[in-house]
Image: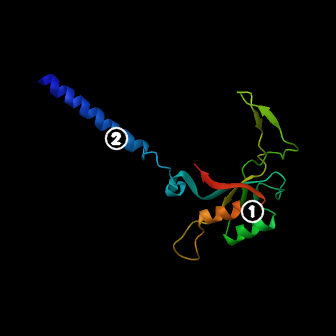
Amino acid sequence: MKNLLTFLLLIYSIILSAQQADSFTGDNGDKPRDPRADQMNFVPNEVLVKFKDEVTLSSGTRLKSAGISSVDKILQANGAAGIEKLFPMAKKLKSTKIVKDPQGRDMVIPNLANICKITVPQLKSTGGAPTDIYKFIEALKALPEVEYAEPNFK
């Protein structure tokens, strides 16, 4: 009888720990997650943008504007504080550089000179209309000068 009780207690603790592990790891039955649902995965009000290699930005590390009229209109409309180059020491590549990865496949070295961080104002309940970060990102993605725009993930 004592062995049976010990066995049942052991099985119960294993089942309980498995349920807790599922809730801890966020197992949601393999449903795709909407990245907008979890606001804590990125830095609020910061967007990372990579401009295409052929685009020439204004010189400097911290910029008031990009020097591209279509981009500057969107920045001004959303009250962006400015643009900061993430890799200020990176030189613009003159040509595409290709290297081999450990598996022997070709890998293109990315141009880091045109990657920037844009900060938009904090969302406030008072004052003007708040900047919807997702609409801001979509507006940037629609520009032909932009290769990609995304939240600044942590």
Label number found at residue 75: none
Left or right, residue 22 beside residue 135: left
Q: Residue 66: give x, y in percent of width and height.
A: 78, 62
Left or right, residue 38 beside residue 105: left
Residue 66 against residue 109 in the figure, above or below: below
Does residue 81 appear in the picture of this structure?
no
Q: What is the total number of numbered labels drawn onto the structure image? A: 2
Instruction: Farthest residue to the right: give it.
Output: 94
User: Does dot 2 land on a helix, a strand or a loop?
Assistant: helix
Q: Choose top left, top right, bottom left or bottom right for residue 137.
A: bottom right
Does residue 60 appear in the picture of this structure?
yes
User: Does dot 1 land on a helix, a strand or a loop?
Assistant: loop
Left or right, residue 101 beside residue 152: right
Pointer 1: what residue? 143
Q: Nearer the viewer, residue 29 or 97?
A: 29
Dot 1: few (<14), some (14–19), or many (≥20) neighbours within 10 Å? Answer: some
Give the mark, 1 or 2, whose residue is nearer the N terminus: 2
Pointer 2: what residue? 20
Q: Residue at x 26, y 33 (%)?
A: 13
Residue 10 against residue 114 in the figure, above or below: above
Q: Choose top left, top right, bottom left or bottom right for residue 91.
A: top right
Instruction: Farthest residue to the bottom: give it.
Output: 127
Three-letter amino acid code at the position of disc 2: Gln
Instruction: Farthest residue to the left: give it.
Output: 1
Q: Residue at x 43, y 42 (%)?
A: 25
Three-letter amino acid code at the position of disc 1: Leu
Label pair 1/2, CB-CB below 8 angstroms: no
Q: Nearer the viewer, residue 103 or 122?
A: 103
Q: Nearer the viewer, residue 15 or 125?
A: 15
Q: Residue 142: give x, y in percent of width and height.
A: 71, 62
Dot 2: few (<14), some (14–19), or many (≥20) neighbours within 10 Å? Answer: few
Marks 1 and 2, Cα distance to the nearest angstrom? Answer: 46 Å
